Image: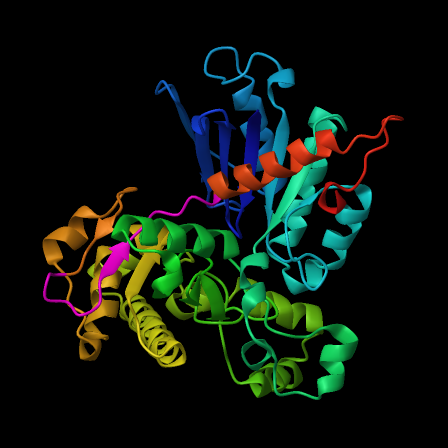
Amino acid sequence: MKILVINAGSSSLKYQFLDMKNEKVLAKGNCERIGEEAAGFHYKTADNRRVDLTMPLKTHIEALNQVVKTLMDPEVGAVKSMKEIDAIGHRVAQGGPTFSKSVHITPEVEKQIEDLIPLAPLHNGPELEGIRACKKVFGDKVPQVAVFDTSFHATMPPKAYLYAIPYRYYEKYKIRRYGFHGTSHRYVSHKCAELMGRPIDTLKMITCHIGNGSSIAAIRHGKVIDTSMGLTPLDGFMMGTRCGSLDPSIVTYLMEKENLSPEEMNRILNEESGMLGVSGLSSDDRDIAKGEIEGNPRAILTHEMLVYQIVKFIGAYVAALGGLDCLVFTAGIGENQVDLRRNICRGLFYLGIEVDDAANHQMVGGKAGEISTERSRIPVWVVPTNEELLIARDTQDIVTRLRYALTEDKTVVDPLDV
């Protein structure tokens, strides 16, 4: 089975085309800085044919159209016919209380994903556009599967996921902490345990997914007990354009002072805050790092705030876990920002964490490995995430069961009920 995986982020779109016979990646790439005139489009096949373009990609739908066009290109494409694409797997940020596991996408599922857009405004909307665009391009015969960021966090206990607001709002609206980046946290936690040569059900781990969108998860014996993102991806620590946790009164205060509507306030917190809002430079950490080197005081402040907030979350989760066996960095910034990793670990020196500078500098560009010294009481790892592979595995499993769930009259039965 050959599967196209679409993984849309708030300002990015990663994709992979995999042959699941051996889980080989036939083509992969990413679109970055979506929404800007000088967005980047990158594509690479297994035999190293490449396409690297700078072009305007105003929306995720434009980025997806470029992906499909390149996959079908006669010179650099990975397929000669659309018939070679057996299924499409989509990463969907918010499953809410509706989806606790991956599902085959039906019109009803589309509607349910749409209903959840207010809980993940930067993600569910673009992801739904991608799902519908794929339907237009490939037709109804190519099955699509949604894999939800929230599902891995479903093991959190009520004491961790409930908010201290009137309980009736949980009962009526299901307002609670859901968490995100679940596929990434699930992948890197299991992969790190494998690299350490230890069963995951014996480990207390903290995984740090740090990118344009970021979250931290506390994982005990392979199950999440707490995570930094909440009802929406806005919660936690500061991100590319998101504010992270703040005093709720700030929202009502600003709305009153600036005469803002809920939609305007939502846009400010999701799209104008975080590293962009503090630095005044960019939402991209590479630009802020450049500004820091040049001595820009607000760029320096942005990184100081980011490190401080991450250190606080890690310290809280060490307490929640009752100890720590491993700290893991992943995602774009976590996998490549050497200085940020070093500074975070310096803030955790009291735990006995010590970083090997040489190893830290080596673990960039997709490399996995330990960056702590032999003296470090807690091992620190960099593990590149591979959400696409997990999405492809879930997609293959569901589509396989779908095929076996055809009745004699060819009516499709929900594969999860079989």
User: Where's residue 93, x and y in %?
Assistant: 59, 55
Residue 180 or residue 127, whichever sits in front:
180
Is 377 covered by the magenta stretch?
A: yes
Q: Is residue 291 left or right of residue 239?
A: left
User: Where's residue 52, x and y in %?
Assistant: 40, 28
Q: Is residue 277 left or right of residue 109?
A: left
Q: Is residue 273 left or right of residue 259?
A: left
Q: Residue at x 52, y 68 (%)?
A: 229
| The N terminus lies in quadrant | top right
- Establish if 278 lies above or below 36: below
- Establish if 389 lies above or below 363: above
| The C terminus lies in quadrant | top right
Q: Mostly what secondary structure, the magenta segment?
A: loop
Q: Judge whether residue 286 can be spotted in this image.
A: no
User: Where's residue 98, x and y in %?
Assistant: 72, 59
Residue 118 falls in which quadrant of the image? Answer: bottom right
Q: Residue at x 40, y 70 (%)?
A: 278
Q: How is the image coloured?
A: rainbow
Q: Judge whether residue 87 can be spotted in this image.
A: yes
- Establish if 382 lies above or below 401: below
Residue 145 or residue 133, whichever sits in front:
145
Q: Residue at x 68, y 75 (%)?
A: 175
Residue 284 falls in which quadrant of the image? Answer: bottom left
User: Where's residue 305, x and y in %?
Assistant: 34, 74
The span picked out in magenta is 373-387
- Establish if 248 lies above or below 107: below
Is 254 covered by the magenta stretch?
A: no
